[in-house]
Image (spheres, rainbow, N blue to C red):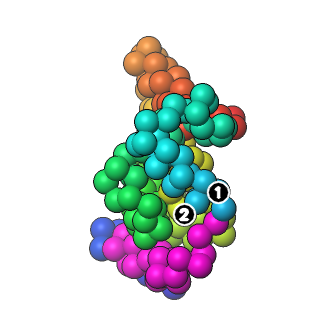
């Protein structure tokens, strides 16, 4: 099976997406799998759309950018469990794709393959909060962006301030999604 992902073919990412979707299918279909934090995030988005203020009318330790994301999700989809699961899966698949892009760009392996995407995708299935639309997932997206900037900064001969600025900016944004990211 691992030999299948050692071939440098972009369609392998489609197979990884299908595998991730199949593993998440029971959670996508049944609302019985909704967790208490997920329901809390939905209620925060709903209350923000009703006009309540975060940290004043809503007592929650949610990051401000996460609250905005949940507000937008509630505005577009309402209190929909399926939308939270699908958006979380799409963001997670972007992370899988981007992690593989980082591995290919910075030559982490001797050959170009899709094993980093496969391992990142499978390991994410082990953690329940990572695959749903959670503050951890949203913050981790920007940590991956900062990781790419960090590798760019390490590889370049002339150290530019742009890479350092990007690293700090991405980590700051990640902290606004989830305070405990670092």
Residue 76 among those drawn in magenta: no
- The picture quadrant where one finds residue 76 is bottom left
Dot 2: element: helix
Other-residue count near label 2 (Cα within 10 Å), few / some / many at <14 / 14–19 / ≥20 = many
Residue at x 64%, y 57% (from the top left corner): 37
Rounded to the nearest angstrom, the CA distance separating label 2 from label 1 is 13 Å
157, 115: nearer the viewer: 115
45, 166: nearer the viewer: 45
- The spot of residue 117 in percent (x, y) is 48, 64
- The spot of residue 169 in percent (x, y) is 48, 24
The residue tagged 1 is: 37
4, 47: nearer the viewer: 47
Work out whether mark 2 precedes mark 1 in sequence or the reverse, and give the earlier one.
1
* The C terminus, quarter of image: top right
Q: In this view, does 73 lie above or below 25?
A: above
Residue at x 47%, y 82% (from the top left corner): 29
- The spot of residue 8 in percent (x, y) is 35, 68
- The picture quadrant where one finds residue 18 is bottom left
- The picture quadrant where one finds residue 152 is top left
The residue tagged 2 is: 131
Q: What stretch is highlighted in magenta?
A: 13-35
Residue 111 in view, yes or no: no
Residue at x 40%, y 73% (from the top left corner): 17
């Amino acid at each position: 099976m691992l030999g299948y992902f050692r071939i440098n073919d972009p369609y392998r990412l489609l197979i990884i997406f299908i595998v991730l979707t199949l593993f998440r299918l029971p959670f996508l279909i049944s609302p019985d799998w909704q967790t208490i934090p997920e329901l809390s995030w939905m209620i925060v988005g709903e209350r923000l759309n009703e006009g309540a203020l975060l940290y004043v009318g809503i007592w929650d330790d949610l990051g401000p950018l996460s609250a905005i994301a949940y507000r937008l999700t509630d505005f577009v989809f309402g209190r929909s469990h399926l939308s939270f699961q699908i958006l979380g899966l799409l963001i997670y698949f972007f992370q899988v794709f981007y992690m593989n892009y980082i591995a290919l760009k910075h030559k982490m392996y001797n050959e170009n393959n899709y094993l980093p995407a496969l391992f990142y995708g499978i390991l994410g299935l082990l953690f329940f909060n990572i695959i749903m639309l959670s503050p951890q997932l949203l913050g981790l997206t920007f940590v991956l962006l900062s990781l790419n900037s960090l590798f760019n900064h390490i590889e370049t001969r002339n150290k530019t301030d742009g890479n350092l600025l990007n690293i700090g900016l991405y980590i700051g944004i990640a902290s606004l999604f989830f305070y405990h990211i670092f």
